[in-house]
Image (spheres, coloured by chain):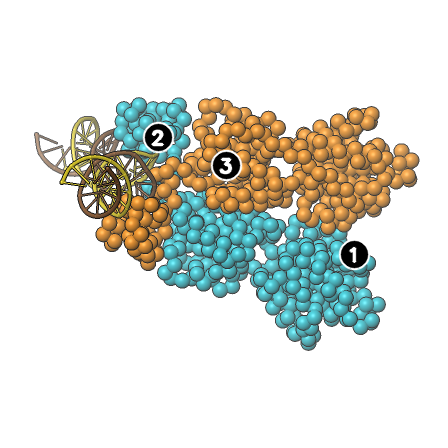
Chain colours: A orange, B cyan, C yellow, D brown
DNA sequence: GGAAGTTGTGCAAACGTTTGCACACATTTT
DNA sequence: AAAATGTGTGCAAACGTTTGCACAACTTCC
């Protein structure tokens, strides 16, 4: 229905190829015809069809992005970075969330390939092995965010981040340090937690490790479990800032003050965390930058610059008001 | 490069049309050939090309979504709703932010049309008149979120929301009520503020209306301006939850307690707002649902069900701990 | 004044599907 | 036994671009 190159050609009395070249500023088209045709195109309300163009040139100028969970504010930062970088390179972004479901992840990526995206970015993949399989049907480059094993990846070193965070708590005098973990995506952090404790000769007490869903709710339900322990912790390290907020809320209901009675740490450093009350001690995952770097890497792959190395970015500790030296009363009550 | 229908046809010894029909489960293809061809397709790693298909059938099964600001958590809720609904209808989503720049908005939408999306959703458009222009080049349906004038829109009635919120403050005894506004997108709320005051015979004091950027920063800078007034407010109504959080932080630095010394209200009801400290009195914009409804509306338009009416959804007040009756000390000091 | 180069345009194939129409053969109906 | 209907498949055009190749006309050079 829409006006096509042929329509313009007919009216201008030239061939479609000439119109195509005129619109693309081909050097061998005379200035006269160029001007005329461009004028005509404007008048006729011509809007080129990327679809047809993609078919002809065999590239779609589109990148597929599959994220773990659109609900989690952390991924928002990532998407921001990705969106900006993609737009800067004049690509478009197809966005999908797979909500931690491996089957859905596969569906999404398969659909991306049907649509012939030029490349794919996925966060926290559950099916890395499929991308690695040399004869899957996915012939386009894939960059995985936060993978430790995939060759084309950019990852935050969360284990180290968590290790340093726990060390901070230990330095403050804490010995009974709990960890609220998220079983699916929290293994790295849990590992950092363990390593830090062991490095300081503190044995890991399984009772102090409780699972959660990674949201505020998770924190709300996890905290009471810990506080009802015969021997409760003096500090709680959380899977992310959201759980930390949940934990703090639950503690307040228990009439526990943060940080006077108990210290709490987050992970992510959401924009709001610095302005929470108390402001959150946490680990900054530079989500924006990770997103950008992932796009840069992907575009290099798309352009067949194959000398790409996995990137690991170090997070940064943000010491704020939700942690304090262990209180004497609590510490000695143990 | 990838295997095409023709490749399969050659190997199967049939025509490409037969292959196409076999893969699409056309009734007039014998079960035998169907099975054979589908088997073959799997073995050869065939992935159909949506691009070619789109060209042939003249629809892309894609919806373009242009949002005001990807940075604002409010829009995240919207995008979640949109993403879910789009996926449920087996469309794909092209996502772009135009960061409050009308020129960029136009670019984005133009690009959507080049890519022949089947429809477009835009939030808080700055160029509604262009979509209304009967001979623009945009031949596909557009749904605008939060427009009061566009015929195909779903909007939250923010004026009413704000009006009720201010009434709540007045009922609590407040008379000097400030409003932190966002000049670009906050006109409706400002209007609600004005109407509420006037309805209660309180004159609008321009000194109590201060602009901000709509983020935490905006709140941080706006609050001191208000508190340094000769005659400061006893309540501050904010453009959104983020500014409210900024305002509360600034107040704390001024040794003002919320809500004992001063009440603060937000707008949006972010997930976190119920768990802020103090929990925020605010107006819930049901972002998820608005997103969903917009998609439903758009899809009806795409399917030429033209009986669509603009939808207005009423927000809901959430009374929480950041507001309290006006304190006697402050009130009488006036 | 012929060879060589330059400039501007057109032809036609290609990209990978879908689909109306035609047709051959088999089956059922009258 | 002829006619009508049903079943399975192929032909070829269409969707809207891009682009290698060819070619004519015009310049420039020796």
Please say whether residue A50 is visible from this viewpoint: yes
Q: Is residue A255 above or below residue B142?
A: above
Which of the two discs, 1 and 3, sits closer to the camera?
3
**What residue sits right under mark 3 in the picture?**
A299
Q: Residue at x 73, y 39 (%)?
A: A317
Q: Is residue A140 above or below residue B185?
A: above
Give SS at disc 2: loop
Q: Chain of mark 3?
A: A
Looking at this view, is B273 or B246 the one in front?
B246
The answer for how far apart the CA atoms under marks 1 and 3 are is 46 Å
**What residue sits right under mark 1 in the picture?**
B252
Q: Chain of mark 2?
A: B
Q: Residue at x 79, y 36 (%)?
A: A168
**What residue sits right under mark 2 in the picture?**
B4
Quadrant where the N terminus of chain B is found in the figure: top left
How busy is the neighbourhood of tag 1: few (under 14 within 10 Å), some, or many (20 plus)? few
Give SS at disc 1: helix
Q: Chain of mark 1?
A: B
Quadrant in the rendering for residue B151: bottom left
Looking at this view, is B153 or A136 the one in front?
A136
Q: Which of marks 1 and 2 precedes in the sequence?
A: 2
Measured as percent of width and height from the top left, residue D18 is found at: 34, 41
Please say whether residue B119 is visible from this viewpoint: no
Quadrant where the C terminus of chain B is found in the figure: bottom right
Left or right position of D12 against A209: left
The reply to the same-chain question for discs 1 and 3 is: no
The answer for how far apart the CA atoms under marks 2 and 3 are is 26 Å
Looking at this view, is B274 or A278 the one in front?
A278
Tag 1 near tag 3, CB within 8 Å? no
Tag 2 near tag 3, CB within 8 Å? no
Q: Residue at x 80, y 70 (%)?
A: B331
């Amino acid at each position: 229905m829409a006006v096509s190159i042929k329509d313009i050609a007919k009216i201008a009395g030239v061939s479609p190829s000439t119109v195509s070249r005129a619109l693309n500023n081909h050097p061998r088209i005379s200035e006269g015809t160029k001007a005329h045709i461009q004028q005509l195109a404007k008048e006729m309300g011509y809007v080129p069809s990327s679809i047809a163009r993609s078919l002809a040139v065999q590239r779609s100028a589109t990148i597929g992005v599959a994220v773990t969970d659109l609900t989690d504010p952390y991924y928002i930062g990532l998407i921001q970075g990705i969106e900006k970088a993609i737009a800067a390179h004049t690509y478009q972004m197809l966005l999908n969330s797979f909500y931690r479901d491996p089957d859905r992840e596969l569906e999404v990526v398969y659909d991306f390939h049907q649509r012939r995206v030029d490349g794919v970015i996925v966060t926290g993949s559950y099916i890395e092995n499929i991308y690695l399989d040399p004869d899957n049907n996915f012939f386009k480059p894939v960059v995985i965010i936060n993978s430790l094993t995939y060759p084309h990846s950019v990852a935050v070193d969360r284990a180290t981040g968590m290790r340093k965070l726990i060390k901070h708590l230990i330095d403050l005098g804490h010995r009974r340090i709990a960890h609220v973990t998220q079983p699916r995506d929290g293994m790295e952090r849990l590992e950092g937690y363990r390593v830090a404790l062991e490095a300081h000769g503190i044995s890991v007490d399984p009772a102090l490790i409780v699972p959660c869903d990674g949201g505020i709710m998770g924190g709300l339900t996890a905290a009471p479990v810990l506080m009802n322990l015969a021997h409760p912790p003096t500090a709680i390290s959380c899977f992310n800032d959201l759980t930390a907020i949940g934990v703090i809320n639950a503690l307040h209901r228990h009439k526990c003050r943060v940080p006077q009675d108990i210290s709490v740490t987050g992970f992510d450093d959401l924009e709001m965390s610095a302005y929470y009350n108390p402001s959150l001690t946490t680990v900054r995952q530079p989500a924006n930058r990770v997103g950008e770097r992932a796009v840069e890497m992907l575009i290099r792959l798309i352009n067949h610059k194959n000398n790409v190395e996995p990137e690991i970015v170090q997070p940064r500790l943000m010491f704020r008001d939700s942690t304090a030296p262990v209180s004497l009363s609590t510490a000695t009550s143990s």
